[in-house]
Amino acid sequence: MSVGEGGARPEPRGFASDNRSGVLPEVMEAIIDANSGHAGSYGEDFWTERFGELVREHFGDAAAGFPVFNGTGANVLAIDALTRPYEAVICARGAHIDIDECGAPERYAGVKVLTVETEHGKLAPGDLDAWEPRRGDPHFPQPRLVSVANATEVGTVYTAGELRALADRAHELGMLLHVDGARLANAAASLGVGLGELTTAVAVDALSLGATKNGAMIGEAVVFTDAAAVEGFEFVRKQGMQLGSKMRFLSAQFEPLLGTDLWRRTAAAANEKAARLGAAVEELDGVELVHPVEANGVFARLPREAIERLMGELPGEHPFYVWDEDAEVVRWMCSWDTTDEDVETLVDALRASL
């Protein structure tokens, strides 16, 4: 592919992933500002210290945050820190740690992933009891951690009450609760609450705090709501190859996001476009929404022929993804920079394909 004017590669806009959007101008500016002179390495710098302050502001005075390179690293290291090799993590079937991390939790954290069939991607407190009859059985991995994604892989959102019920049941059974928060900002914006209200306030023990899907360039974070409960994570992060030498550039991105309400505004913008898209396609004959549109994803069933025509009509190799080939379900993801025109273009093309 040739490079266009100014070095930019012309790429079509689409709905394949919220990872495809660019970097927020405020985040890019923060990275540039951090690129001044020398600074301590491996987190011994002003920006990482400031990141720690922001984590405590959002998640409580006892919380501690650790920047890492990516979401899989955040999930795997959080699981590794909270489990032993003979233990297991319970999650919804189809969760990111189940099918989208190439078996990393099982290989690197050494735990068994136990999955539950769910409705709209959400665990219920009763789902955690399924393996209790094998508690203490040396032939069976011992459930120790419950991991939920908020927003879920199918675009639904756990309320604070639902998370509290899960946390209470997990703790009653001697387990901990982890939240994969790659889209935590979208979930909080959807409910009109703060990040801490969906984590610390409802007794979540640890979370993977997302940033890239909400406008950052690179990097997520592992957050423990009670730092005293987890010792030695600095070593876990280093062994897990997620300790950045020039960490200031990871940490600096969180200042505009968490230091202002930017995280909420960008997530709310993506959610609003998904709601607009969902409402528009729901009115079309031959289209069925298969999950509630609660965050920034729209999941719909449409005829296979229409899917193929739509793929050909829209620009780009993968303008969106077919989520379930057998069920003829597609996924459309909205980003912080999705426009009304983008939505209208997709809806018009979908109408034509039907």
Image (tube, helix red, strand yellow):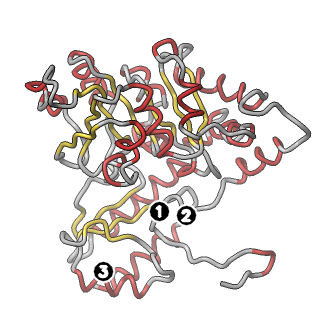
* Residues tagged 1 and 3 counted as in contact (Cβ below 8 A): no
Dots 1, 2 in contact, CB < 8 A: yes
Q: Name the residue type under label 1.
A: Ser
**Closer-to-camera residue (66/183):** 66
For the C terminus, give its image quadrant. Answer: bottom left
Which of the two discs, 1 and 3, labels the residue nearer the N terminus? 1
* Percent coordinates x, y for residue 166 in the rendering: 25, 27
User: Residue, x 36% and y 83% (percent of image)?
Assistant: 310
User: In the visual, does 281 lie left or right of 33?
Assistant: left
Dot 3 amino acid type: Ile
Eyeballing the image, is 204 above or below 297? above
Q: Residue at x 65, y 52 (%)?
A: 217
Identify the residue at image location x=55%, y=49%. Answer: 214
- Give me the C-alpha separation between circle 1 and circle 2: 6 Å
Q: Using the numbered discs, state the Cα–Cα distance from disc 3 to disc 2 in whole angstroms.
A: 21 Å
**Residue 285 locus on image (x, y percent):** 21, 77
- Per the rendering, the mark at residue 17 is 1
Determine which quarter of the picture holds residue 275.
bottom left
Q: Residues within 10 Å of mark 1 (few under 14, many from 20)?
A: some
Label 2 sits on residue: 20
